[in-house]
Image: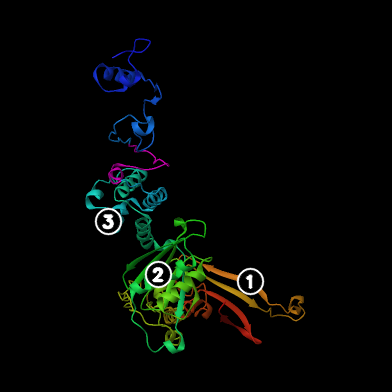
Amino acid sequence: MGGGADGRMPLSHRACPKGGAEGEAKQRLRLGHSNVGRWTIGRFEGAGATWRERAGSLGSPRKKTTNRCCGAMSASGRRRRGALDSGFTMDETVAEYIRRTVLKIPRHEIMEMLTMWDFLSKTQLQTINVHQIKERISQEVVQLCEENSASIKQAAILDMIYNHAYRNKKIWTVYQMTKAAEEEEGSDAFNLADFKYKFKRSLRSALKNVTINFRDYEDNAIWIRIAWGTQYTKPNQYKATYVVYHSQTPYVFISSLRIRIPLLCQALVHASNYHDIHEMELRSRCLDSLKDIVFKRYSQVSHFSSFYSKTFQTYHPRPLQERNVAPEKVDPRIIQENKREKERIQSVNQEVFGEGLQPKIEFAQYKLETMFKGEPEMDILTEKEPFRCVVKFSSPHLLEALKSLAPAGMADAPLSPLLTCIPQKARNYFKIKERKGILSASCVGT
């Protein structure tokens, strides 16, 4: 075997792991030689890099070796031990979406939600160390998901589990569907599979780039997650719309959405076999309280509710909370002034608001379009245009705050019906107009 012009072995012999050539090649690696001929010797960056892919053809094929890194995931690809065996590479956007979803989950709830997800096996879940920083936890979850060939469908289901647990982070708007007059008598039995098929077909016939996922929960609640795209862009998974539909009622709860609402309402009406749908002007962050209002599950027993209750369907009413009748320890030397007046206020307040806890509403908005009334010499009265303004009441628990005003002496009892009619009218957005010269204002829907 002849040597080169300088008396050294040819390059092909030095690279071949045979005889003394193996020792020389190892020595070159130890010395840090980064270039031998046209081959690159050294540490290669990026998951899945191999000698054959970086150096070119070396003759006979060899097994690929993987350089795993526990730091930030490479943007160019994520081929790991499970993915290498199956030849599957998880889409980068799916991996990033799963990572961000895990980061949103509180540390003490990560394992619980991953178990509810039911996508990772028990053995895989046991390998996750939840006592490390959340960034590394999310990367471990992404790696396990890639081993199981996760797609955007599985990522969306994990997001649905999180948003169901933290549904009060969204603002929900209530919609009510109605049937045609001739359809009121007979109602067909609800078919969930048929509903899902019609809903998907209706949306995708109008918009191709859309991701739709369903998940069933208690009380016949169907959660729908919709990620919207355009004709030229993929669905934006980070701005998904959520819909909660109770199959035995005409009510639909939709998270904040304005641009695509006509398409969504059309799909809901078509899939649920209704004729029309309209917004009820009732919004809140507390989804359960909205359900209590429209399903009449709150404990308000006002005489005003007798009329409005006829227009709403009774839906699994909750038992009233028991009153605390334990006698209070009162110093006999203390004389309560205005005792009768306080008892009257308490009685009126209980008649208006009921005994139990009120539904949780964070705000109520009143849009005024009324005329000024006062001295005729005021110049403003000559104007024919009504005075327009918006009055908004805000509180973490508005109805409970209103309920406490009269007993605290901060308002007269009873309060104005404009404030106490929110649960009966099932709305917290009002428009107040003049009614044909009558001085009193009325609540008119926008």
On the rendered structure, is 149 left or right of 177? Answer: left
Classified by dominant secondary structure, the portion drawn in magenta counts as: loop
Circle 1 is placed at which residue position?
389
**Residue 397 visible in the current orientation:** no
Mark 2 in CB contact with mark 1 (< 8 angstroms): no
Specify the amino acid type for callout 1: Cys
Where disc 2 sits, the SS reads: strand
* Residue at 35% across, 71% down: 221
Q: Is residue 119 visible?
A: yes
How packed mark 3 is, by other alpha carbons closer than 10 Å (few <14, some 14-19, many 20 or more), is some
Q: Which residue is mark 3?
A: 115
Residue type (three-letter) at the residue carrying disc 2: Val
Q: Residue furthest front?
A: 1
Alpha carbon of mark 2 to alpha carbon of mark 3: how far? 23 Å
The image position of residue 229, as x and y in percent, is 49, 59
Could you tell me which quadrant the N terminus lies in?
A: top left
Residue at the image point whose x is 51% and y is 76% from the top: 419
